[in-house]
Amino acid sequence: MLRFLLIVLFILNSSFLNAQENNLNNKITKNLRCLICQGQSVYDSDSEFANSLKLVVEEKLNDGLNEKQIYIFLKEKYGEWILYDPEFNKNTYFLWLLPILMFIAGGAIIFKLFYIRKN
Amino acid sequence: MASLIGFYSLIFGLCVSFLIILFSIKNFRNSNIFDNKIISLTFLQFFLVIVSFLSLILSFVKSDFSNQTVFNHSHTTKPLFYKVSGTWGNHEGSLLLWLLVLTLFIFIFLLKSKEHNKQYRILTLLFQQIIIIGFFIFVIKTSNPFNYIFPVPNEGLGLNPILQDPALAIHPPILYLGYVGTSIIFSSTLAATSLNYISKEWAKHIKQWILISWIFLTLGILLGSIWAYYELGWGGFWFWDPVENISLMPWLALTSLLHCILVLEKRLALTSWVVVLSISTFTLSMCGTFLVRSGILNSVHTFANDPERGLFILIFLFCLIFLSLFIFFFFHKTKNKDSNSFFWFSKETSILINNWFMIYFLTVVLIGTTYPIFLEVISSKKISVGPPFYNKLIIPFLIPFLFAMAIGPKLSWIKSDLKNKSYLILFLIISLLLSAIIIKSFNINFLINTILVTSAFYLFFITLRDFFIKGFKNLAQNLTHFGFSLLILSILFNNIFSTEIITNLKIGETFETDKYKINFESIEQKEEQNFKAIIGKFNIKNFDGNIEIMKPELRIYNQPNIVTSEADIKTNLLVDKFMTMNLVQNQDYFNIRYQIKPFMLWIWFSVTLISFGGLISLFKKKYEA
Amino acid sequence: MKLRIFPILLIVFFITIFFIFYKGLQNSNIYTPVVNIEKNIPSFKSKIFSTNEKISSEQIFKGDKFYLMNIWASWCVPCRDEHPLLMILSTQKNIKVIGLNYKDNKEKAKIFLKELNNPYDKILLDENGTLAIEWGAYGVPESFLIHNNKIIKKIIGPLNEDLLLEIKKLAE
């Protein structure tokens, strides 16, 4: 058991050090939706467009832009649609808040079940 | 010829529906004994659909291109296995499969419910026939699989190569068994509601069907995910794609139903909630069918877009919704007894908490999937809702959910206390320490990671302890909860510790990082019956000195002419090594991806474990009865 | 009273959803970026196809003239179809046609131009597709009509006779 754990730790350790190298790049391309194969992220897609976009993201990162600036740049070129992570604005209030509201409502209903009993 | 037989047996099948309805209504009014003619008729209907289905398979096997469906989705050079699986790999054929399972399930239902009230059985059959008739008309009118084309083409258009895959060949039948199983739950609940028949016995009996659909749905989702892993994605297994989401939604509803039916079975409480859940489970399955088949959403899995089809399902779906609303509000009587009240610290509460979270997850997925449609209709703005949205809203809520999953089953019915439960705290400390060590030693300072891993470990240890302490008592429940903790752990570690290298290489070149040395040795070509393969040979030297040979492929399919990339995956107990190569337009190099993904096998294994738990529960109950 | 209101609300809710889905069915599920927004052209530096010299965007696009920037490649089939239309445009005095050679093999591109003639005043080189992204393009062919350093029309996909007329009209 212990040996098993050690092996696990060893493998995880060595692979992890490597992982951070292009983390940010991957994170950004995973958040972009490919316009050619529209069901996939740029990261997952291998279309010509996606491959070029990966390069652009890399270039922009090298130019010193941060994640947000890259999103703004691409949003301006291709529209909000390209971002997989919808921004919180007046169009998406419901998207973000409705699930949370449902959660609170659910909690209230459960609470009420006990409250009634007490009275 | 086969097409003709297939088409006419469909028509006859539809006619039998009306006969069944006629006999059922007569039997419902006049007699006290269930008329066995009805069962024979149900079997006849099932038989007719089977004939129709077999004749479609036959057309596929014989490559009868006078049939439009065969022409669109098959090709003579395709291996026999994929000719057969191509039958349900398309819109028309898969609907025929739906119909087949619908008729099969109601037949089994009638056979298996003999000890139940006659009126209840007949009414269930009637509701089911409404669904069946809807699907018959849908198939015959908008998606007839037996359309004839003339002049007869010599060759078909072929099946999309990414669908030519063993996992995907069995994925739809399994998934449909799950989807369609929910229709039985739906009809039976409506019948039981209208007759005021909801009782502990009914709960016990419907639980079987819930379990069956749940097991198949779980396995179906698993197969789809495995397929996506090695065929579609580049090492991903869940993309929050609409098609995946719509299979997840009924699953979430079913899972909460599975839990709260226990309360009904034990205490005859929460009846309204069970009814609502049963109705929404099937409604969500139908809603999913609508979203995928109408082409209203954009997904990696494309079915033929036809607005007429979409409109038909949409109207049908809302007819069913209004029918169930009507029945619910007019017939449902809440039994206002003492049984509806709970003590706050009991198993009932923990099940309510499970439902609370499940419904929350369901809302997240439902809103995330359909919101772009609403926004576009209302403001004509187009947005995408993708993985980051789901991650942000689901992951934080997983933490309390996992804790509740660990503690909930420990509570007893009606009222419980926590004497002699000090080990619960002990285990919490152990899990916290263990996850802190793991997360710390890899320099991830995310607080949320530690807590998340802690909660998953907690559930893991608690359920593990139960295997030793309780043995076979509550095995099914314990096994699924254990499987779930394993699943979350594997996914977490997989996410945190995956590594990948993306680079462009020419033949003979070597790419080196401090950990790996990838050498593109050579390339060879192979001819198969339905595709040409370009196989790359890569020599990878790992950090520990091990050498791995990877052979990813590019396949050029002849019909239709599509290039796909086949990953080479080396799986072992702990890690998957995953390599793909891709052509780059007009360049002499290939785009190479090499990924190391820990615990992939454990993800598949834990889901299998979860559904196996369901299976045990199914047989255990049968044994007791 | 409370019991009556709830079902009615629910029914209204579902009817609304029905209509939204119904409306949604009529929309296309394929996304194309909005084409009719006036945007400034990006500023960039690029290689010239024939000479490999560097040139900046300011040197290419002068304020008062009309330019049609066309993204093309020799491997792209629709580019072949729209080529004669570009040839017609290149004879127009008030419009200059600029080419952007997208991810192409140089030799093949040269053969392509030899076969079908060269309508381009200048050809820029985009070896890895990044320049096309600066323009907000995502495939080949795409064309941009430019005036006063602004994109006044964007065409996704190949040109056709109607679009050609429209371009001529816009450039008058």
Image (spheres, rainbow, N blue to C red):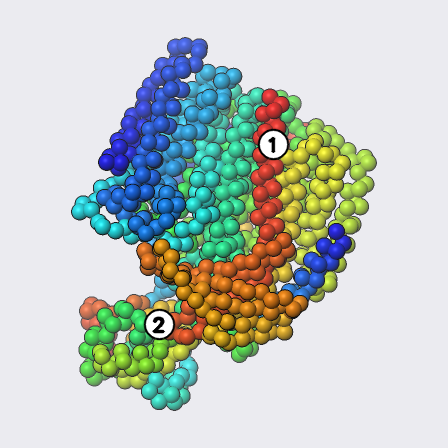
Amino acid type of the residue that numbered disc 2 sits on in the rendered structure: Glu
Q: Quadrant of the N terminus of chain B?
A: top left
Location of residue B385 with respect to B214 vertically, above or below: below
Q: Quadrant of residue B388?
A: bottom right
- Is residue B32 visible in the rendered structure shown here? yes
Q: The disc labelled 1 sits on which kind of residue?
A: Ser
Q: Which residue position is annotated with label 2?
A: C38
- In the image, taking residue B329 as reference, residue C36 lies left or right, namely left
**Residue at left 51%, top 74%?**
A58
Q: Where's the C terminus of chain B, which quadrant?
A: top right
Percent position of residue C128, x then y? 42, 76
Tell which residue pokes out farthest to the left in this image.
B151
Pinpoint the chain carrying mark 1: B
Q: Mark 1 or 2, which is nearer the eye?
A: 1
| x then y, percent, for residue B291 | 40, 46
Question: Which dot marks residue B617?
Answer: 1
Task: Give x and y (percent) for residue A108.
Answer: 62, 39
Q: Which x, y percent locates residue B363?
A: 53, 45
Helix, strand or loop at label 1? It is helix
Q: Residue at x 70, y 28 (%)?
A: B414
Who's the residue at 52% across and 42% down the image? Answer: B219
Above or below residue B233? Residue B543 is below
